Amino acid sequence: MAILGFVNTTHFDHGALSQLPGILKQQGIKRPLICTDKGLVGIGLVDTLRDAIGNEFEITIYDDTPENPVEAAVDDAVKIFKEAGCDGIIAFGGGSSMDLAKGVGIKATHDGPISHWAPLNGNPIGEIPPLIAIPTTAGTGSEVSSGSVIVTNEGQKIVFVSKTIVPCVAICDPDLTLGLPPYLTAATGMDAVTHCIEAVLTPVVNPPAEGVGYDGLERAIRQGNLKAAVKDGADKDARWNMMMASTEGALAFTKGLGAVHSMSHAAGRIKELKLHHGTLNAVILPVIMRFNEGSAPEKFERLRRAMGLAEGADIADFIEDLNAEIGLPRNLADMGVTSDIVPGMVEHALGDVCHFGAPRKPTADDYAMLYEQAMTK
């Protein structure tokens, strides 16, 4: 079993979920709140979690996590957390459950609207209750990241960033992803790929994080594990490598992210569309790769090598072909995005924290053009 000691301690291997009771005791947690969703309840994975925890802990479950976590859901979970006298949090699910659990940690210990703690407001986030993160998808890497994305009551999709919301322990058990449907495997897998690529391209100097990003890309793309996991949901080796690529993507984006994410966050906040973050990243990534071409030629060539592409190959074309092969949408129009909502998305993208990590920062006109390209390609 791999024990990764980077931003937190991560227990990583098939069967790692068995470590949970001991970890709860180490963290002094007796009454955990489990933040999850009804889908995982329905397929029995929450029962698997309960069985792994055993009977010596008082478990409370919040399973109303929406696909794009909103502050109102965070408030509902905080109320349950306090009424049950919980002393810790278990995030169990994909990125949405992770984000919501971090939001619960913030609002359980901090007064006022959650927007008060947004990075641009300059108010540091203090300590939160102990948080254990257990991913059931291989995509966001939120189990090892310092970020949480919440749609506020005012309709802003904000990235909250603080070392204090990094889970104290993560359990990455690839067995929990066995049988994940092909579409969700593809969408979350491309989320991990996007993290690796955008982290590498940010101008921040952090060679160790950059090296982790290249390794994640090699596992997902060059070694063929993303395609293999989509093709066969029971491929344990592919699932192990995709979960590692996901974790590595988040370790890499300690460098920051870029315009793919600022555009995705702006689109993902539109509650009527209910757009999946990983799918948005996959569709937008080729457009931004063309926009970034020439901004970091040496990094582009190293990306090609990590992905197993020929020298000078068009990465954007490759990503578009890969998206089609693994069953993802061709463009944003196919996902329901229309031109009339572009101005609002442009405004949001310009203020998103990820915008400031782009190697080539789009202007308002650029973002409008990029959205149109992503809608029609």
Image (tube, rainbow, N blue to C red):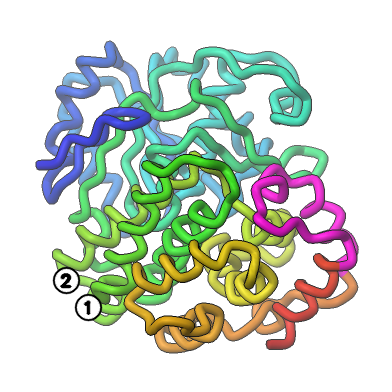
* Label placed on residue 317: none
Horizontal side, residue 147 vs residue 344: left or right = left
Taking the spot 63% from the left edge, 72% from the top edge, the residue there is 293
Q: In the rendering, at what x and y percent does residue 214 appear?
A: 36, 58
- Looking at the magenta stretch, what is its main secondary structure? helix
Above or below 18: residue 141? below
Above or below 348: residue 84? above
Where is residue 31, by image quadrant? Answer: top left
- Residue 80 visible, this orientation: no
Taking the spot 40% from the left edge, 65% from the top edge, the residue there is 189
Give the SS element for disc 1: loop
Q: In the rendering, at what x and y percent does residue 193 appear?
A: 43, 64
Q: In the depicted view, which residue is nearer to us: 267 or 163?
A: 163
Q: What stretch is highlighted in magenta?
A: 341-365
Q: In the depicted view, which residue is nearer to us: 223 or 125?
A: 223
* Label placed on residue 232: 1
Specify the quadrant that holds the C terminus.
bottom right
Q: In the depicted view, which residue is nearer to us: 144 or 92?
A: 144
Horizontal side, residue 69 vs residue 131: left or right = right
Give the SS element for disc 2: loop
Q: Tag 1: residue type?
A: Asp
Q: Residues within 10 Å of mark 1 (few under 14, many from 20)?
A: some
Check if mark 1's residue and mark 2's residue have beta carbons within 8 Å.
Answer: yes
Q: Tag 2: residue type?
A: Asp
Taking the spot 40% from the left edge, 47% from the top edge, the residue there is 141
In 3D space, how far apart are the residues under numbered discs 1 and 2 (Cα atoms)? 6 Å
* Residue position marked by numbered label 2 in the rendering: 235
